[in-house]
Image (tube, coloured by chain):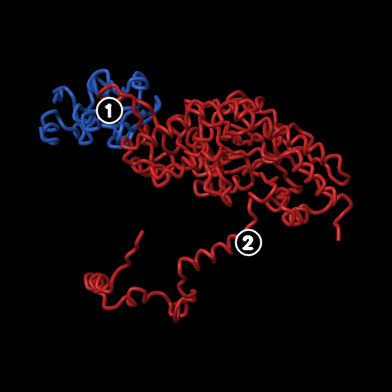
Chain colours: A blue, B red
Amino acid sequence: MDFPQELKYTKDHEWIRVDGEVGIVGITEYAQSELGDIVFVELPDIGTKLEQGKQFGTIEAVKTVSDLYAPVSGEVLEINTALKDSPELVNKEPYNGGWMLKIKIFNKGELDNLLDASNYATMIGH
Amino acid sequence: MTFYPNTDEDRREMLETIGVARFEDLIREIPDEIRLKGDLKIPEAMSELEVYTHLSSLAKKNTSMSDSISFLGAGVYDHFVPSAVSALLSRSEYYTAYTPYQAEVSQGTLQAIYEYQTMICRLTGMDVSNASMYDGGSAMAEAALLSASQTGRKKIVIGHPVNPLYVQVVKTYCHGQGFEVVEIPPVDGIVNAEMINRVIDDKTASLIVQQPSFFGTLSELFPLSEVVHSKGSIFIVNANPISLGILKPPSEYGADVVVGEGQPLGIQKSFGGPFLGIFAVKEFLLRRIPGRLAGVTVDASGERGFVLTLQTREQQIRRERATSNICTNEGLMMLASTIYMSLMGKEGIREVAIQSTAKAHYLADQISRLPGYRIKYHQPFFNEFVVTTPVAPSSIIEAGVRENFLAGVDLSALNQSESGLLVAVTEKRTRSEIDAFVKFLERFSYGMLK
């Protein structure tokens, strides 16, 4: 499984790609494979303020549903509207077309609480 | 099925395991003065034959619908149910099955649900139907909850005349959630559009109306739906499914949610249940719909198959964030209505609706000519209407039972601020039955007879 080096990871299987003050958020390849076929992703409205570790949405697969947790605190700048009609993008391209949120990061210091790729891979036993 | 209670040995082992000497020690906390002393006062055991005789004599105390000429309505109607419905329902594959949990092995049940949903969508004009709910009242209450979660608002407006029993269920569901239920009284037997316009605001989650109304009347609803939508609220219509054989589907006057009591679709009256809750929505509410939903798909080898879809909104998976606490459906009654609709077809349902309407209008016309009687509301109506009677409706109802007429429903019994006899007519009533009923009513024209 692929866990790109440049990303930071949460214990709840989200990733964040940091570009200056902006972070892009999604779920890992491991998470999508555990969930199975994704049928719906419920995302917050633009402008919503997120708090690190708190729920920002839900993801539904055929047989289960899971909460999505914010990797860092921030404000939602953009959501991936393509997921509305094509939630399977999360399965096919978890790190690219399957992204979920763009957020304005409030405190980059919070990134230090996250895992790097090798720690994340160890945590899930890879 | 044979039932084996715990043996003395079972009890001894269980008590020993939890370290209690005697069973009585477990109920020590119950105060002595409310504990049962001595034996339960129940009769001696009877043989099967004695039980059968006893129950038959109890059953004879009931007034049988099949020996009566019924003009009862108010939500439950005496429509004809073809024998094929009960013959198919009694097949054990259907009769003993619960709503599918290991869904995909229950292809027959899933297909029946899928067909049901399709027919309900065609009748109501909605995009999506669920697999059914308990009854008309709980379907209406679930619609109120759906509107609150969709809009994030807490005010539910009810535009009477709506079945007062359904309103009680709505209030019960809404009570614990802290929702406000605002009831708007009718004007001249139809919805009070002017007052509703004033009450609907940007805090209103939904407007609930009933068409045909609880009094059988029909209101002009399209303008109201525009008001509701202009405030971002949800428009909920409770419809009698048989009436949709002759009336416009609620989708044509702006309904977002259609709920209703499915009993008229081939379900026996059975002393008031089990019945069937119809619940259908426009597509934008798809993910808020309570309960189960069957879908069609193809399997790995390309064969058509049926699945339960969107299950993840249900309580067994989503727990406290489920869209509803229902994760079942009213399977057998859903099947009864599916068989009924399949047998009747488009033409049959239309025929039932037209005959019920024509016969109800004939009866209303005859009653209106009787001295002392008046049709209370001069509004368009389907198969039900309110009559102002020369003597108390309860007296007429009581006298009717002795002559095998079920004369109608006394409105004051359901709501103290209402009065009149609510009379319904179905396709089953013949001209001679209706004429005999009119003759019976005529006897009260000049007061009670001795």
Q: Chain of mark 1?
A: A
Q: Marks 1 and 2, Cα distance to the nearest angstrom?
A: 58 Å
Q: Is residue A116 left or right of residue B170?
A: left
Which residue position is annotated with label 1?
A37
Position of residue A75 measured from the top left corner of the image (x, y, whole percent): 35, 27
> Which of the 4 image quadrants contains residue B313?
top left
Q: Is residue B445 visible?
A: yes
As drawn, the residue found furthest toward the front would be B49
Q: Chain of mark 2?
A: B
Position of residue B75 measured from the top left corner of the image (x, y, whole percent): 62, 43
Position of residue B381 measured from the top left corner of the image (x, y, whole percent): 72, 34
Q: In front here: B197 or B346?
A: B346
Q: Is residue B58 left or right of residue B197?
A: left
Q: Residue at x 25, y 24 (%)?
A: B300
What type is the residue that disc 1 sits on? Asp
Q: Residue at x 34, y 77 (%)?
A: B24
Q: Is residue B391 left or right of residue B63?
A: right
Crowd class of label 2 (few under 14; some 14 to 19; many from 20; radius 10 Å): few
Q: In front here: B192 or B315?
A: B315
Q: Nearer the viewer, mark 1 or mark 2?
A: 2
Identify the disc placed on residue A65: none
What type is the residue that disc 2 sits on? Lys
Position of residue B235 measured from the top left corner of the image (x, y, whole percent): 58, 31
Which SS class for mark 1?
loop
Which residue position is annotated with label 2?
B61
> Which of the 4 image quadrants contains residue B387?
top right
